[in-house]
Image (cartoon, grey):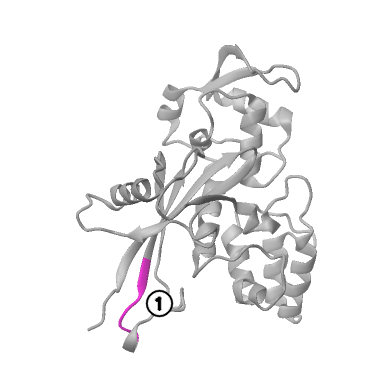
Amino acid sequence: MNGLAHAELIAVLVAVTDNDPRVMTVNAGDALPSGPFESEHRSLQSGLRVWIESQTKHPVGYLEQLYTFGDRDRTPSAEGVGGQARQISIGYLGLVREQDALGADRPQWRGWYDYFPWEDHRTARPEVLGELYARLHHWAQGDELRCQRINFLFGQNGMAWNEDLVLQRYELMFEAGLTENFIQSGVQGFGRVMTGDHRRILATGIARLRAKIKYHPVVFELMPDCFTLLQLQRTVEALSGLPLHKPNFRRQISQQELIEETGEMSGDMRGRPAKLFRYRNDIVEARALTSVRLPVSR
């Protein structure tokens, strides 16, 4: 009888700590938190919340479904005897504020650029891109369509870098044999590997969040209750992997009226105290279904 082996829930839990976008992992950083969906749960989201909090002792605030991963070849063990079984994973993106995770699987927070070092352009174009370009073009062997894809996805030969194309870049690298099997063959530098297709699922989560912060104020889920404008800018930069133009960022934030002054100043002893802000819940709620943008102007 043909059918599904089982369905699992898998979570991309994101936090930003010290200007570093981080993701919760298990198995010493080799996998994302995951667990079986239990039929007694009222919904997939409620089931995932229960599972995450029981396994990691970590409360989850914002949560949205990413994608259902069910490709036949997504993991080495995805297909059972006679092709009867296939693993189905339902991915979710969650935004939290980092705290110690004390669950049974000993979750650990890892920087997401450890897995995708070519995605961080905040200070300069990553050095790894040079080697990556060379390997991709060697794979392309002059094929015009392949070369066009490389140029478009990796911002080469006059093409602009598009930070939202995280998944497409990873998929092209996979097609070219430059992901897990490539690294395991002895060549290093193209990011930390993960079990099965968890790195692909993480790429999906990063791409979703980078796109989301442009039209929905979800970044506030990652901020403390009070923050400076510089802290807000650094958080958006960390997620997008891009440097932002400070005056433009502040002007657009002011125009959108998403935040308000608290009347207090930061206690930073390393420089001049800065005004503290908080986000306006009434504005966020009222505009949640509209095209509010948190600017990523360069």
Q: In the image shown, does 253 or 262 lie closer to the viewer? A: 262
- Seen in the picture, residue 151 relative to 207 is either above or below; the reply is below
Q: In the image shown, does 206 or 298 lie closer to the viewer? A: 206
Residue lying farthest to the top in this orientation: 263
* Residue drawn where x is 64% and y is 18% of the image: 266
Specify the segment rendered in magenta: 83-88
Residue 254 in the image: state x and y as whole percent: 61, 23
- Seen in the picture, residue 86 relative to 30 is either above or below; the reply is below
Image quadrant for the C terminus? top right
Residue 85 lies in the magenta-colored region: yes
Q: Tell me the amino acid under the disc marked 1.
A: Ala
* Residue drawn where x is 37% and y is 51% of the image: 55
* Residue drawn where x is 32% and y is 89% of the image: 82
Image quadrant for the N terminus? bottom left
Residue 291 placement, left or right of 52:
right
Q: In the image shown, does 295 or 233 lie closer to the viewer? A: 233
| Mark count | 1
Which residue is disc 1 drawn over? Answer: 78
Residue 242 in the image: state x and y as whole percent: 69, 45
- Seen in the picture, residue 233 relative to 208 is either above or below; the reply is above
Residue 27 placement, left or right of 122:
left
Residue 243 in the image: state x and y as whole percent: 72, 41
Residue 169 lies in the magenta-colored region: no
